[in-house]
Image: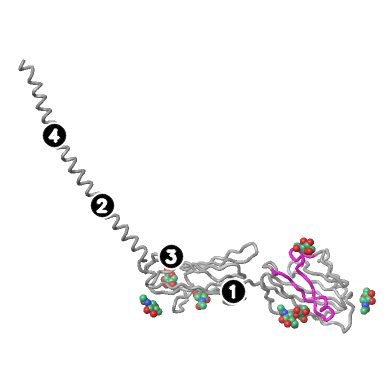
């Protein structure tokens, strides 16, 4: 209830509108680092801290981020996720500095924050917090990665991890020509909201060519670069494959010769056997004719 009531109470009690100063440009906070959300107010020369109220809330959902009232922090109604991560600068309060320190920034912190302050007068102002996380250095891989020949279709994949917000990948060839047309891009967020960016460029290999991918983070600028040069040598028949092929061919030849020799011997043997069988058959026939003759003899 407090997060709904307090601004209303402040508004009713306030006699006049007080000027607050917050950054006009979005505040860029690095992931996992601390951020200061500046908010300063014009104030009477001397005032009692127990008369000061400061109320930070999420502009869209009106959820309570940090409350200070009657000289102390009041965090019972703090939105989930901000526990132990917020504080004001105690010594700065009487100087008109109501800035909020937000520790260990996460992607979900991104958004608009409203700062309410009341001393005698009352004022409010909103600022935007933008989260940035650097990507890992991009890694460039080829598919297939060997036995490449000019004219082959090759998929070049450029991958980088753990960044925010969504990055941009620009592909170039050796002469700086933009190849980004024929690209498929995928962005996958992990539990923390950080992206893995994968860009795949399909090219038809030309001899002696360079391909590079450049990763750009819209908030942090150019972040990394990877390139591969496919020289004539890469494309030529790789020596290892050549020797393996020659070796296999020699083995096959030897095998064939051996097989041929074995076959010839087998054929010769079976020929001789056939001849022998034929002769035996003839002899048998002669025997039979002899026995056939016998009864006639007797
Ligand atoms: C906060 O205010 C201080 C003092 O005016 C300034 O130096 C600093 O750059 C500001 N920080 C941000 C994030 O605006
Ligand atoms: C408020 O105080 C903190 C801590 O000294 C400082 O970092 C910040 O810049 C101050 N903000 C303004 C607007 O003066
Ligand atoms: C500030 O306010 C408290 C409570 O209202 C009071 O006890 C204290 O004397 C005041 N201090 C000054 C300097 O006005
Ligand atoms: C905040 O800090 C308190 C005391 O150190 C601890 O008991 C509590 O679990 C912490 N809460 C979170 C969400 O980290
Ligand atoms: C993109 O692909 C098309 C068709 O495959 C091709 O005509 C064109 O030259 C390619 N563009 C670049 C920059 O390689
Ligand atoms: C390269 O081409 C793509 C698609 O045509 C375009 O979006 C991108 O802005 C170009 N980049 C550069 C550096 O020219
Ligand atoms: C490859 O290109 C480089 C630079 O353009 C050139 O110096 C080299 O002679 C080329 N090599 C072949 C085999 O074409």
Numbered badge on residue 145: 3
Q: Nearer the viewer, mark 3 or mark 4?
A: 4
Provide the residue designation for mark 4: 278
Q: Image point 67% across, 75% down: which residue?
A: 28
SS category of the residue bearing label 3 = loop
Label 4 neighbourhood size at 10 Å, few (<14), some (14-19), many (20+)?
few
Element assignment for label 2: helix
Residues at marks 2 and 1 touching, judged by CB atoms closer than 8 Å? no
Magenta residues, start to end = 78-105
Residue 121 placement: quadrant: bottom right
| Whether residue 54 is visible | yes
Specify the quadrant of the image occupied by residue 47: bottom right
Earlier sequence position, callout 4 versus callout 2 = 2
Asked whether residue 21 appears in the rendered view, the answer is: no
Residue farthest to the top, as pictured = 298
Q: CA distance from mark 3 to mark 1?
A: 28 Å
Query: Of the residues tagged 1 and 4, which is closer to the observer?
Result: 4
Q: Which percent across, then down, holds residue 179? A: 47, 73
Q: CA distance from mark 1 to mark 4?
A: 92 Å
Mark 3 or 1 closer to N-term?
3
Query: Which residue is label 2 attached to?
Result: 256
What residue lies at 17% left-to-right and 43% top-to-bottom? 268
Label 1 sits on a secondary structure element that is strand
Q: How far across and down, in percent of the image, does residue 224 sit? A: 55, 74
Return the disc, 3 or 4, that comes first in the chain's sequence. Answer: 3
């Amino acid at each position: 209830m407090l997060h709904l009531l307090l601004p209303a109470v402040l508004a009713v009690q306030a006699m006049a509108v007080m000027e607050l100063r917050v950054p006009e440009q979005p505040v860029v906070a690095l992931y996992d680092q601390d951020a200061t959300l500046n908010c300063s107010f014009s104030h009477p020369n001397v005032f009692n801290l127990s008369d000061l109220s400061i109320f930070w809330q999420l502009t869209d959902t009106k959820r309570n981020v940090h409350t200070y009232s009657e000289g102390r922090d009041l965090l019972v109604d703090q939105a989930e996720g901000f526990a132990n991560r917020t504080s004001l600068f105690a010594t700065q309060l009487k100087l008109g500095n109501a800035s909020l320190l937000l520790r260990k920034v996460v992607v979900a912190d991104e958004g608009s924050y409203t700062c309410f302050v009341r001393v005698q007068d009352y004022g409010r102002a909103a600022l935007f917090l933008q989260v940035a996380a650097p990507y890992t250095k991009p890694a460039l891989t080829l598919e297939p990665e060997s036995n490449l020949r000019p004219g082959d279709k090759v998929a070049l994949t450029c991958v980088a991890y753990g960044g925010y917000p969504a990055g941009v990948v620009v592909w170039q060839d050796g002469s700086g020509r933009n190849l980004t047309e024929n690209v498929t891009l995928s962005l996958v967020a992990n539990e923390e909201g950080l992206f893995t960016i994968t860009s795949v460029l399909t090219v038809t290999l030309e001899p002696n060519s360079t391909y590079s991918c450049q990763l750009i983070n819209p908030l942090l600028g150019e972040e990394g670069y990877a390139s591969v040069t496919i020289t004539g040598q890469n494309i030529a028949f790789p020596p290892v494959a050549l020797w393996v092929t020659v070796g296999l061919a020699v083995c096959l030849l030897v095998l064939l010769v051996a097989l041929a020799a074995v076959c010839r011997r087998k054929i010769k043997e079976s020929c001789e056997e056939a001849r022998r069988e034929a002769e035996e058959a003839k002899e048998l026939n002669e025997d039979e004719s002899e026995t056939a003759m016998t009864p006639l003899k007797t």
